[in-house]
Image (cartoon, helix red, strand yellow):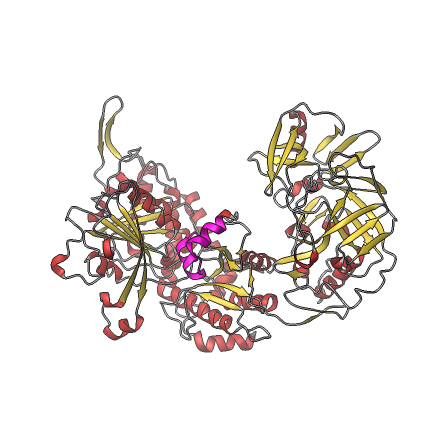
Amino acid sequence: MEQSREEFLEQFGGDYGYPGAPRGVDQMRVADFQRLQGTVYLDHAGAALYSEQQMADVVKDLTSNVYGNPHSQSDSSMAVTDQVTAARHQVLKYFNASPRDYKCIFTSGATAALKLVGECFPWSRESCYMYTMENHNSVLGIREYALSKGATALAVDIEEDKGLEKKHGSPSSDLFKISRHSNQRRGGDVLSQNCQNGSLSAVSENNWNLFAFPSECNFSGQKFNLNLVKLIKEGNLVGLPSQQQQGQWMVLIDAAKGCATEPPNLDVYPADFVVCSFYKIFGYPTGLGALIVKNEAASLLNKTYFSGGTVAASIADIDFVQKRKSIEQVLEDGTISFLSIASLQHGFKIIEMLTTSAIALHTSSLATYVRKKMLYMKHRNKKNVCIIYGQEASKVADLKTSPTITFNLKREDGTWFGYREVEKLASLSGIHLRTGCFCNPGACAKYLGLSHSDLVSNFEAGHVCWDDNDVIKGKPTGAVRISFGYISTYQDAEEFLKFLQSSFVSKPIASSNGHTLSMNTLNLVDNQSQQVVPDVRLKSIIIYPVKSCQGFSVQSWPLAAGGLKYDREWLLQGSGGEILTQKKVPELASIRTLINLELGKLFVESPKRKDKLQISLLENLTHLTAEVDVYGQRYEVESYDENVNTWFSEAIGRHCTFMRCSSSKKSLCTSTGQNGRLCRDTRSKLSFVNEGQLLLISEESVSDLNSRLSSSNGNGKQHVLVDAMRFRPNIVISGSTPYREDNWKRLHIGDAYFTSMGGCNRCQMINLHQNAGQVIKSKEPLATLASYRREKGKILFGVLLNYEDGSSGEETVAERWLQVGQEVHTSTE
């Protein structure tokens, strides 16, 4: 790494690390960001990070001064008023906006500021709301106000000819090409003349129109030319003759993304409205933003609602109200977040020490370096690994280079790695990044090549924001984004590049047993697949009556239509209707369960309860019957009385409801999919299991995994070893060879037959384990499994089975039992 660092510094040393500041980035990182040790944080576009010194200054300030509600004349109120006034000036200074021309309105964030503009703007039937396709949903949302008042909304793409800009050196409409999308109008009214043919002219001087664009796209990182402000306000964007210009156009800049490195200079680019959120700049406080509004534009905003702090006088029982004269007081409802506003000075102190121009050069040097390295990454067949959206690689960092890189990754066969797979593996490597469309549907569709029909089809297929449907019909539905901030380092960049190289660039990997596995596809059939399997036996049987709680081992157990009898037949539901699992409620791991078939009872114990809960297996419940959704599957359930619910609520430390599955409504396909395997959706009852009815784990596969864990935890580190129980299996077998179970299609144990549904996709839950009563979370064994057990976005270990009960219709089938020690017969046909 040292050689690479030297090469990096040779190219970017003048821009990287704040050479002109009192402290460099490495010093700040060690002194003020100790919590980042072992972590690579690359989501500064999502939220910047506060420094420890910044928070210490905030605490000292708040514990040394008495700050009261500013709506009074007391000393504590006046102290806050002074702080708020100083903060307004500091914000205006950040955007180089003269207090004579602009006002700073504090809001709960950039979204609230945008909502305020949309709510108060003087819309009419002749108004036009025009916005660029590359805009955040919070900007798109303004059109609801425009359309509801009869105005027209219009989305446009703006392309800039950077060559002409360099040639002419001054802003001109010739620099831009506008592509219009369809006009939007509600109620069947005639389209506003201001939006027809893409013209920016208005029909009267009293008509107001609004154009909105981001200073920097939060999806692609594209920085928009701020000369658009003057061209639009003057009506010159489409080159109309000056005598036809009656335009009353106002301009709104969404600076939420761009202001951390390049805040719009409002003295040069006098936009009417600019919005920002302060946590995007220096991490704290959250829930605080600002609307920077030009005085002339502020006088046109018409706010209907009034509240505490916004009125000079009002009478309760007649229609009388006089609003205050100050635009800040009129637009800021109620008591502003005065303690957060008082904390702004400590964030701005850091920015002023470094300067925004130095931050821009620092972050762009890292982004330029990483972008270039990513474009050079090739698979062994010379195919590109990284597809970067929105920006070309540049060899020189400057203020116009975005600190954001948005991309998707391709396998060597040309198919896509899903963004959720990337995010999952990044998390295992301690890398924080963001995936999806980042609330920017226009940019997402544009760069991913998604048509309207694609978007509608994806939605109808069940895809919504933040879900796991990352590739549909061979196309990505979102992307991966990394973004650098003022505290990012070269080490962060290098760790990210190493992660990409080791996790996604194809190369042969020799396994410990000599078999060669591909980087991206499991070799499910090895050279021994046709040999006779030795004596494979059933080693353990484990039942988990309550989903995500501890199970218990037995020597023998009966089978039912849903698999092992009573397995995951109960679950706990949270107060919000969510299903509780160990991922979110680790306390579930301490709840012990046991079923006594002779007594017909389920026994439940918890270290937080002295009494043991006893629940009858055969008793007909008389409590409410309802339907619940468990990961997209509808179940009819029966609930228990409050005594049972209270017991579990105290055991896990949160309110919950104990439920039992009475029936499953799953009745879908039994068709054969690829490689001759049955699809996961079968007519078999599933109880509350996620996919297959039973999970099989091989002791030999666990042993192979442990050998890899041992070798990867060398250099004196403590070995992380796991047993089969870490994976919550239902049946454990022994006597096979590692991963031979991947190839099995059918099994029979005694007189019971099972169908393999394929490998079990593992998640972070296998990284949880108990130690001295405490639930410990680590990166293993999932990180090691990800290095050699990945297939098409899934990390596979163990196989899922469905029980073939042999029933058809209503006929009764004799109960079958599994017995430890039984021989396991397998078939790959």
Question: 136 left or right of 588?
Answer: left
Residue 130 on image: x %, y %: 28, 52
Residue 300 lies in what quarter of the image? top left
Tell me residue 666's x, y (percent): 64, 40
Name which residue lies at 73% across and 53% down. Answer: 799
Query: In the image, residue 527 lies at what x, y percent?
Result: 78, 68
Looking at the rendering, in which quadrant would you find the N terminus? bottom right
Quarter of the image for residue 721 reads: bottom right
In the picture, which quadrant includes the C terminus? bottom right
Residue 447 is covered by the magenta coloring: yes
Residue 288 makes an appearance in the image: yes
Which of the pair 818/60 is nearer the observer? 818
Magenta stretch: give its range. 439-459
Q: Nearer the viewer, residue 35 or 628?
A: 628
In-image side of 328 versus 613 (left or right): left
Magenta stretch: dominant SS?
helix
Q: Is residue 458 magenta?
A: yes
Q: Is 826 placed above or below 71 here?
A: below
Depicted 640 relative to depicted 343: above or below: above
Which x, y percent locates residue 671? 66, 50
Q: Residue furthest top?
A: 317
Q: Quadrant of residue 529?
A: bottom right
Instruction: Identify which residue, 271 or 666, lies in the foreground.
Output: 666
Residue 90 in sight from this viewpoint = no
Residue at 15% x, 56% y is: 245
